[in-house]
Amino acid sequence: MIGSVMLAFALGVCPPQLSVDTVVVLYTAGISGALDPMPASWINPEFPPMCGGAGSLVKLVEEYRDKYPLLLVSAGGFFHPLDSVPWRRVVNFFNKAGYDAVCVGINELHLGMDTLKVAIRESEFPWLCANLYSRNRERFLPRYMVVEKAGVKIGIFGVLTEYADMFSTTPVAREFVFTRELEAMEDVVRELKVQGVDLVVMLSHLGWKHDSVLVKEVSGIDVVVSGFDGWALREPYEDPVNHTVILRTYDRLGNLGMLKLFVDRDTKTLVGYEGRLLSLLEDESPS
């Protein structure tokens, strides 16, 4: 987990004896198909500035990718729940942006199993979920993946709320089975540690209340990209028990989350971080 020099990084100071690598995590959640430029009426209802939408995000991701080893991930909810924005358009955008991994969200289940499998086949990125099965108890998605960035071995896994059928506008339980979140998290973290990963990142479609409780129960998770219930954290939140860093961004596409992870080059341990929400306003991030 996070090392003792974290405070130095928070103050913008790097101890001279410490050699670190920086890995950047860019993250979204709850886009719900909102790809087009849109007025940011939540900033000024009468004279709203314009958000640049998908074009601004792609440009901003490219700028960070040129500077840092990068992970681009989503905590789910990227399709429109009624498919009024065609799912294929969202997949094409994710392919263009170069997403590294996504977690399945409730909106994606609304497609039904057959169409969901088509969307997965057309994706140039993995879909992850540790507690989702087909109705006949077959696992049709990987639980996790392992990638290497700047010599750092990172395990990434997804978890979907076990109450998905309760919150869905369609009877998704007819085609899908959701198992217990806590048990799925424990099993995956245990396997990833056996594989010798340096960092563990969870893509969560559970919501803030569940995330903030479960990270106290499961040790070994370094970062949670949290989605499902819509509101954001402007800065990362560090759980006081296991020191897991929780990240959240607003729904739709008004901003992009950014986290810098500082990793000791010798021990491969996380020694600090800094993060914030990046604006996608056209004036600041022109498409």
Image (spheres, grey):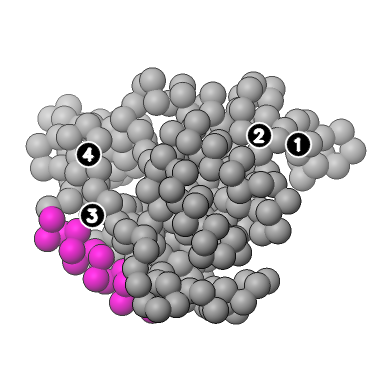
24 with respect to 79 (left or right) = left
* Sequence-wise first label, 3 or 1: 3
Tell me which numbered mark, 4 or 2, is placed earlier along the sequence.
2
Circle 2 residue: 53
Q: For the residues marked 3 and 2, what is the alpha-carbon distance in whole angstroms?
A: 35 Å
CA–CA distance in space, label 4 to label 3: 18 Å
Q: Which residue is mark 3?
A: 1
Instruction: Kindly state the secondary structure of the residue where label 4 is placed.
Output: strand
- In this rendering, is residue 43 above or below 56? below
Q: Which residue is mark 4?
A: 148
Label 4 amino acid? Glu
Provide the residue span drawn in magenta. Answer: 180-195
The quadrant of the image that shows the N terminus is bottom left
**Which quadrant would residue 282 be assigned to in this image?**
top right
Nearer to me, 234 or 84: 84
164 magenta-colored:
no
Cα separation, mark 4 vs mark 2, equals 29 Å
Residue 71 drawn above or below residue 67: below
The residue drawn where x is 51% and y is 74% is 175
